[in-house]
Amino acid sequence: MLAYIGLGSNLKDPKEQIKRALSALNDNNEIELMTSSSLYESKPLLDIPGPNYINAVCKIETKLSALDLLDLCQEIEESQQRVREVKWGSRTIDLDILLYGGQIILNKRLSIPHPEAINRAFVLVPLFEIEPEIKVPLLGPIKLLLDRINKLDVKKL
Ligand code: ROI
């Protein structure tokens, strides 16, 4: 299965956090890391006070189920001592499964396509960089999704 994961960090050397998480994905036997986007910098969403975020998106090939992939993402978050005191608060590392094949998944632990992330510039811009022709289930071609948002919100590093 092809899947896309969004990564974000705004604490404790964010660029290093993203790189560590990408290596952890790559080191896993059940995952082949196919591509990762450039790093992008943006202000915290909704102008919530805090350091700027670094974000990236990667494309993986995996035989893991969506829920097993979620477990793995959460293990990686924990191994990087994720701090997340409050919802919308700063965090050392965040891994979101954005897309899992063309599947639509809705259960207690997982909503795919990721309902919030997939509308955000810091996800759409790096996803477009690595997969300009992708169609997001339920939502359509990424090109059209990008046209609706303000791409100036993110700066390519
Ligand atoms: N803001 C930005 N710019 N990037 C993120 O990855 C991010 N992640 C979050 C919230 C707190 C919503 N804000 C963010 O979870």
Image (cartoon, helix red, strand yellow):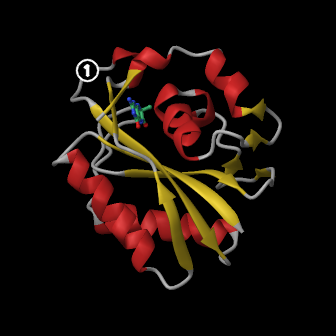
Quick check: 115 above or below 93? above
For residue 127, which quarter of the picture? top right
Quick check: 154 above or below 40? above
Please, which residue is most extreme toward the bottom here?
29
SS for tag 1? loop
Image coords of residue 83 (percent x, y): 28, 50
At horizontal 34% and vertical 42% (from top left) the residue drawn is 39
What residue is pinned by disc 1?
49
Q: Specify whether 106 is left or right of 155.
A: right
Q: Specify whether 17 is left or right of 148.
A: left
Which one is in front, 156 or 5? 156
Quick check: 136 above or below 145? below
Q: Specify whether 43 is left or right of 101.
A: left
Image coords of residue 120 (percent x, y): 54, 27
Image coords of residue 33 (percent x, y): 50, 68
Quick check: 141 above or below 35? above
Task: Count all numbered tags in the image, as a single digit.
Answer: 1
Is residue 28 visible in this depiction of the protein?
yes
Which one is in front, 59 or 76? 59
Image coords of residue 124 (percent x, y): 56, 33
For residue 132, which quarter of the picture? top right
Q: Amino acid at mark 1?
A: Pro
Q: Quadrant of ligand 1?
A: top left
Quarter of the image with the C terminus is top left
Quarter of the image with the N terminus is bottom right
CB of mark 1 near ligand 1 (< 8 Å): no
Please, which residue is most extreme toward the left here?
12
At horizontal 51% and vertical 14% (from top left) the residue drawn is 150
